[in-house]
Image: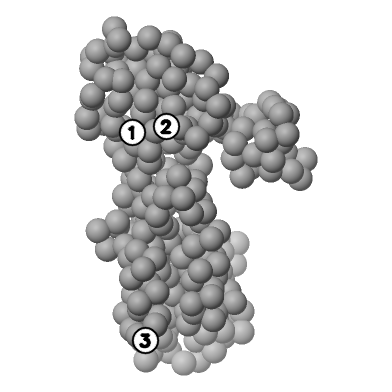
Amino acid sequence: MNGILNVNKPGGQTSFSVVAMVRRLSGERRVGHAGTLDSTATGVLPVCLGQGTRVIEFLVGATKTYRAEIELGVATDTYDASGKVTQRGDPSDISRENLSSALSSFRGLIEQTPPMYSALKYHGRRLSELARAGIEVMRKSRPIEIYRLDIIDWQPPLVSVEVVCGKGTYIRSLAHDLGLELGCGANLKSLVRLKYGLFDIKDAVSLSQLEDAFRYGYWQQLVYSIDTVLLHHSAVVVNSATAKTIKNGGRVVLGSFDRQSSLPCSQSSYRVYTDDGCFLGVLCFDSETGQWQPQKVFL
């Protein structure tokens, strides 16, 4: 039971509760998810099973696409609609042009400060735990990248935006910071994750569909293979002798005895397959030795 499920997480459930449900349905102990969604958020949540949990690290850096509805004029302590109101402002004089101008400062490489209500840790304790205890600590801003940020709809005081961003981006912080930029306060009213890497909400399965799939025995049809998340890496096929060395964690020099006579070292990682088409793992180039080192082995 190795692979990845593209789950459409409903509102009102935590990402962990979805993992617990998949663990119960599948009977597989090793289950994890990539990219936590807040309980109020919905959309794409990749859930990894078995050996699939070992590719979560490759999913972390994947590009994500969100549809966010932001309410202007109200700021909260959680930066979303579930929190306590901390500020009220008048957004009546804000135009679409004002919004476009304000949003332009959030595109590209920017610095963002994570919210207190988050899973990040401070001296071993989650920030959200400290926040609920009434403790606020200074958080360091960190670089994030927003590739695209477009207004989809503007029905004052609500603005809907579509965001394409890199890892570590908090859409709640984006909503809060937009309110600061406009001077009226703002909070994230709703959030849907439309894409996570190659996983699209159009193909995502609901929890009820997932339950039916396990109940009636066709769940395998919903599982993506482990190497799906690595398709952006080129592939190489090796013979049985080289495959044995890689399985044992040994370094290899890939030459004419393999299906690819030479690999350009400008690409640091490769997917590697056995002669019979089984996904073996990921190889990384060691410039000091001129050899390829197994980074992950799945057979």
At 42% from the left and 32% from the top, the residue drawn is 188
- Horizontal placement of 215 versus 127: left or right? left
Residue 265 at x, y = what percent?
44, 62
Residue in the foreground of this view, choosing between 78 and 1 = 78
* Mark 1 vs 3, N-terminal side: 1
Residue 188 numbered mark, or none: 2
Q: CA distance from mark 2 to mark 3?
A: 39 Å
Residue 69 numbered mark, or none: 1
Residue type, label 3: Gly
Image coloring type = one colour
* Residue farthest to the right, as pictured: 123
Residue 251 numbered mark, or none: none
* Mark 1 vs 2, N-terminal side: 1
Q: Residues within 10 Å of mark 1 (few under 14, many from 20)?
A: many
Residue annotated with mark 3: 217
At 27% from the left and 20% from the top, the residue drawn is 156
Residue 207 at x, y = what percent?
39, 66
Q: Secondary structure at mark 1?
A: strand
At 63% from the left and 42% from the top, the residue drawn is 120
Contact (Cβ within 8 Å) of mark 1 with mark 2: yes
Residue type, label 1: Glu
Contact (Cβ within 8 Å) of mark 1 with mark 3: no
Contact (Cβ within 8 Å) of mark 2 with mark 3: no
- Determine the image quadrant of residue 163: top left
